[in-house]
Image (cartoon, rainbow, N blue to C red):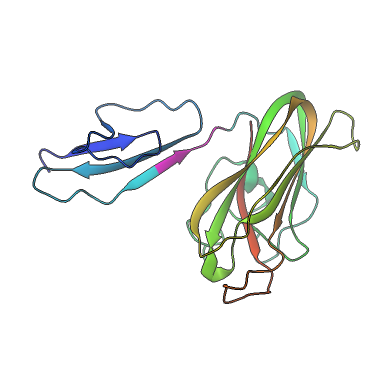
């Protein structure tokens, strides 16, 4: 429609042209690091459009070789183990078995990576799906191990995540800062919630962890 302006922000605030929050989109935006862009459309005399957003994540290193030490659940193999390093988001829901590795109970993400040229690592992120009605919830923890000698692992980072206090849906990345260094081998471990909380209709049952991407920076 003639006269429509798209306002956007990159600082986490919701755009609002009348309040002077955000910029008017006039040309492509250059993204060089992790960035979330919020945007909506405005037209004088009309209500603003619904707010939407795009999230961009940097992926500096992709391993030359990797292997999953624990297979994903046979029901959710996502098209193969390579989905966790293919730099493509999985389907927007769990009913399409495309791009997601699913883990439950004794299963969990345990991937070992090798780099011909040691990677200078500072942060590991995993992309997850959240679908509370399907018991797909955030991870309980994320651990990172490293080595420059095969089999001699040192834990260089660990991060625990709180059990959610209410339903959550959508895609979300979880991060773990690590001891900076150059490493030829990385081991990344993420575990699902062992028991769903008391408010959940499946309380006491194990949660599912769905992973579609591992980002190494």
Residue 98 place in picture, x, y as percent: 55, 57
Q: Out of 82 and 180, give the one closest to the viewer.
A: 180
Residue 37 place in picture, x, y as percent: 38, 37
- Examine the residues drawn in magenta and state their main secondary structure: strand
**Residue under the point 24% across and 28% down:** 26
Q: Which quarter of the figure has residue 24?
A: top left
Give the total of numbered labels.
0
Magenta extent: 54-58
Magenta segment includes 57: yes
Q: Is residue 171 above or below residue 200?
A: above
Residue 110 place in picture, x, y as percent: 76, 49
Quadrant location, the C terminus: top right
**Residue under the point 62% across and 52% down:** 211
Q: Is residue 90 above or below residue 37?
A: below
Q: Which quarter of the figure has residue 191?
A: bottom right
Quadrant location, the N terminus: top left
Q: Which quarter of the figure has residue 19?
A: top left
Residue 109 place in picture, x, y as percent: 72, 52
Q: Out of 166 and 185, give the one closest to the viewer.
A: 166
**Residue under the point 74% across and 66% down:** 105
Magenta segment includes 32: no
Q: Out of 41 and 66, give the one closest to the viewer.
A: 41
């Amino acid at each position: 429609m003639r006269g429509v302006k798209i306002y956007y922000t990159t600082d986490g605030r919701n755009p609002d042209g009348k309040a002077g929050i955000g910029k008017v989109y006039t040309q492509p935006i250059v993204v060089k690091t992790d960035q979330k862009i919020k945007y909506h459309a405005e037209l004088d005399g009309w209500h603003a459009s619904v707010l939407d957003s795009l999230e961009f994540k940097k992926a500096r290193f992709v391993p030359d070789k990797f292997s999953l030490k624990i297979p994903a659940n046979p029901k959710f193999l996502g098209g193969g183990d390579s989905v966790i390093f293919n730099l493509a988001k999985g389907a927007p829901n769990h009913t399409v078995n495309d791009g997601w590795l699913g883990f439950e109970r004794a299963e969990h993400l345990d991937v070992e990576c090798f780099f011909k040229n040691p990677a200078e690592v500072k942060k590991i992120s995993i992309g997850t799906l959240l679908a509370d009605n399907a018991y797909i919830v955030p991870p309980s923890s994320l651990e990172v191990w490293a080595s420059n000698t095969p089999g001699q692992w040192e834990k260089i980072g660990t991060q625990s995540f709180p059990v959610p206090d209410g339903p959550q849906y959508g895609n979300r990345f979880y991060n773990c800062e690590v001891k900076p260094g150059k490493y030829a081998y990385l081991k990344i471990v993420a575990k699902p919630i062992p028991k769903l909380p008391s408010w959940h209709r499946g309380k006491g049952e194990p949660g599912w962890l769905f992973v579609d991407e591992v980002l190494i920076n």
